Amino acid sequence: MRRLLRLLLFALLYPPLRLVYRLRCDGRQNIPGGAYLLISNHVSYVDALVLGAVVGPELRFVMWRHFYRKPLLNWFCRIFDAIPIDPADPPQEVRRSLDAVSDALREGRPVAMFPEGQMTRTGHVHAFRRGFELAARRVHAPIVPAYIDGLWGSIFSYEGGRILWKWPRRFRRRVTVCIGAPLAPETSSVGARRAVVELGVRAYAMRKAHQRPLHCEFWRAARRMGRRTLMADGTGVVLSGWRTLAGALAVARWMRHRCAGESNVGMMMPASCSAALVNAAALICGKTPINLNFTGARSHLDDAVVRCRLKTIFTSRQFLQRISMEPRPEFVYLEDVMAALTRWERSLCLVIALVTPGWLADRLLLHRSRMDDLATVMFTSGSTGRPKGVMLSHHNVVSNIEAMAEVFQFSRRDAIMGVLPPFHAFGFTVTVWIPLYLGVRVVYHSNPLDAKGVGQLVAKHRATILLGTPTFFSLYARGCPPEDFRSLRLAISGAQKLAPAVAEAFERHFGLPISEGYGCTELSPVVSVNVADVEIGGVRQSGWRRGSVGRLLPGLAARIVDRDTLEPLAEDAVGVVQISGPSVMIGYLDDPHATAEVLRDGWYVTADLGSLDEDGFLYIHDRVARFSKIGGEMVAHAAVENALHEAEGSVSRNFAVLSFADVSRGERLVVLYDGPDLDVEALRDRMLRAGVPRLWIPSPRDFHRVESVPILPSGKLDLATARRLAQELCERNAIQPRVDGRCAEALNPASPAHRDAPTPPPPDRSAASSCPPRGERGDPCSPGSPR
């Protein structure tokens, strides 16, 4: 009788559910016959209904005892044979609940559990509890992983900090359930969580079928903003949603005629409203925007122009004067473009922006791009070699934006302070396209080193999110009064490892912690980020772990592999980080060999050394190229730099640690520092007293004062320049620098080193040789935060 009633309720309940949600199941063939334990991420209060609709009415659920006892729900729960459990129960009561799970599996009934034990409050997949392991092993039942995508942000989820009391964003949400291959009953909670997260990669990739290109979604977002401010900058420009759309359309009309026959157009502008408008205009008229690095070597700029076959580069005369750059034949000046637009044309574009809905604009005004079409080519910084052109599709960038939106939970009150230039991957995705794609306010400042100007703009426009690098945050901690940053709710650091001294100085000065994240240009770019711990409904969930770069964004998976064999390693082991997900680049421009080196079976090889803990937090130790083997021990340069900052007790000076070959210890460390003269002996003593291994402490002769440690505009260390500078200083002090992993002195058979000392074994560079040389590849860029 109960089974008939269950079938009747199933027939009555699930058609309305499918009317409200567009349900899609991928991997249904992976569901085995008979008994199995289904485990899934827990996103909303309707997760059980969604899984039941996919699997069938015979599926039994393990549910929280508090809801099981609710008068109205209890009758339904008993009809569907739900199993109550509460982690707060005494151990014997929890054991009885797990015994009920084992009994159901022995009877041949499938059982579903949510091993997180609670719904996510942050959008991440949290650590799995181990109760399901015991139930599966007792009866040797297979474990079937599943991932639910599309319910985060619904009224039944905790997105935005509230449940039910919010307006649904759309009717008939698309919900995807991905079901993976069965796992062995002996699978650990860590392995099961990894399988569920990797299913999230598949679920996010399936979003491509209903995603819209960047410029199409920009049209809708700008119209939603209407008269509200969408963007502003330090020059005093303030644009509403309608005026932003009209300006982009006007430039696109001019570009369509002026650049006919050109597939790519260049841009050379700092962070500004103009840069955002030109990027949007290029995609509207079917051109690929190429944002050029105006701060690097001129040879790198020439190389990018040739490789992208650029005939037109948009820039500004005023900006060229500021950076002292000579005119080029490809330059088109925005001042001339705006002067060429008549008042009638501007008025027409404004009227079109006001009255044309998105569906009509898609058909008549916007270039019909596919999600796999090229959205941009981002050139890496070239900090250690020739910049590579990273090809990113609309699907890559849109997937990264959607994942960040789930984690950052943007609201109408938010405003992003954009200081990173658009040629920086984080600047392009986060400060240009997140505002345009999602309709989030943004304020631009062209000079991120102008701490006073940045602080004034944050205070004036009440910015809530500040993105930068450790170098920039160090400047702001020294140059901005606390009241300027009072409106901030998030400060996100990336591009390089955040020194604890910088984080502490910023938090002490502004009362706001810096959220560190990680990313790579090749990953569109954000990979992971720390978010604030959340406490909602009496449940506290961790989104922050000091020393880590946070959990991965939804839709991304990471694995740590051995540097030599590339075989996956256990949790907490240190190895090379590999990332998989829909934001992984198409490849390198005109460089299939380099592409093949870093894209392997859907995984991008970052050539960063890192580790993952069992809760899913990622730790980045340093680049493979920034490790040295000294006396048989691997030493991370970033760890030495942090130790120097802590011993110095100040963020007023920069340290850069480099490695050189040494005939006695394999390699030696050399330090560049700026600022006033340094008492090296006292600094070394403080490091020793702080417990820093003696092997990590450079000798006094290896400290070199420089006018300024070379820093790229992104805030990262300019390794190429630093190495050249260190080489000059070492030669001046008769220290031979490393050449291809060995010192120049050791390469000369007639040198004193060969005459007076035994030839040591070459330093072990297996970490570098087992992976593609990083060079400028994988430039960590942010809200990773993003590195």
Image: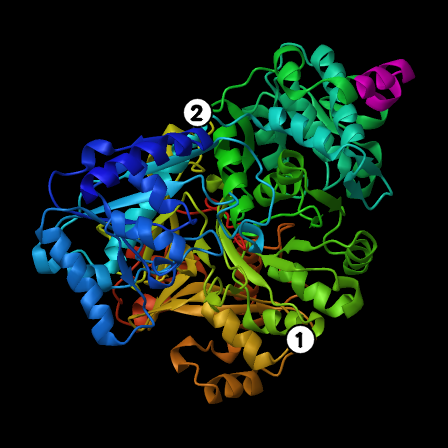
Q: Is residue 655 magenta?
A: no
Q: Does residue 504 appear left or right of residue 628 in this picture?
A: right
- Using the image, tell me which numbered label, if any, was put on residue 435: none
Quadrant, the N terminus: top left
Q: Residue under label 2, please give it.
A: 209
Which SS type dominates the magenta stretch?
helix
The answer to whether residue 785 is above or below residue 510 is above
Q: Is residue 350 magenta?
A: yes
**CA–CA distance between discs 1 and 2?**
47 Å
For the residue marked with disc 1, what is the amino acid? Arg
Helix, strand, or loop for circle 1?
A: helix
Whether residue 230 is visible here, answered yes or no, is yes
Extreme-front residue of the structure = 1
For the residue marked with disc 2, what is the amino acid? Ala
Residue closer to the observer: 760 or 93 = 93
Q: Residue under label 1, please give it.
A: 508
Helix, strand, or loop for circle 2?
A: helix
Extreme-right residue of the structure = 343
Please provide the residue range marked out in magenta. 336-351
